[in-house]
Amino acid sequence: MAHIVDAKGKPCPTPVILAKQAMAQGHTAFTVLVDNPTAVENLKRLAGNQGFEVAVREDNNTFALDFAKGEGCSACEEAVNSPLPAAGGDKEIDDAGGKECQ
């Protein structure tokens, strides 16, 4: 059974905190239930910042946000994990071939 975080009726930032706790517990797929559009936007922003994809469903003023850990962009992962070029060097910075992260 999928992990469900019931944050209906909870004021901000409680839904975000509960979602972050689910992430910290190692959940790579879970659903957060909320009942206000502000929480939806905040949770979508959290998902993007943490490398999760999120799908939003609405039914009778209740929103279900399905979080799933994304695969990530290999060019972005490489850029994050590689050292910065030396200051003052003539080395060009590779822009990952013009690919954008998803």
Image (tube, rainbow, N blue to C red):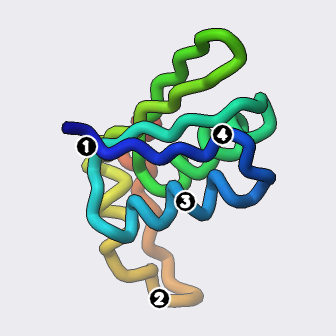
Closest to the observer, 89 or 7? 7
> Residue 41: x, y in percent?
71, 36
Which amino acid is tagged 2? Ala
Q: Residue furthest left?
A: 1
Circle count: 4
Which residue is denoted by mark 3 in the rendering? 18
Q: CA distance from mark 3 to mark 4?
A: 11 Å
> Residue 59: x, y in percent?
59, 11
Which residue is denoted by mark 2 in the rendering? 86
For discs 2 and 4, the disc positioned in front in the rendered view: 4
Q: Secondary structure at mark 1?
A: loop
Which amino acid is tagged 3? Leu
> What residue is shown at x 52% (from left), y 27% (from top)?
64
> Residue 19: x, y in percent?
51, 55
Residue 93 in the image: above or below residue 91: above
> What residue is shown at x 39% (from left), y 42% (from top)?
4
For discs 1 and 4, the disc positioned in front in the rendered view: 4
Q: Secondary structure at mark 3?
A: helix
Q: Quadrant of residue 30?
A: top left
Q: Quadrant of residue 53?
A: top left
Which residue is denoted by mark 1 in the rendering? 71
The mark nearer the N terminus, 1 or 3, is 3
> What residue is shown at x 46% (from left), y 63% (from top)?
93
Q: CA distance from mark 1 to mark 4?
A: 29 Å
Q: Does the CB distance between marks 2 and 1 fall below 8 Å?
A: no
Residue 76 in the image: above or below residue 29: below
Which residue is denoted by mark 4 in the rendering? 8
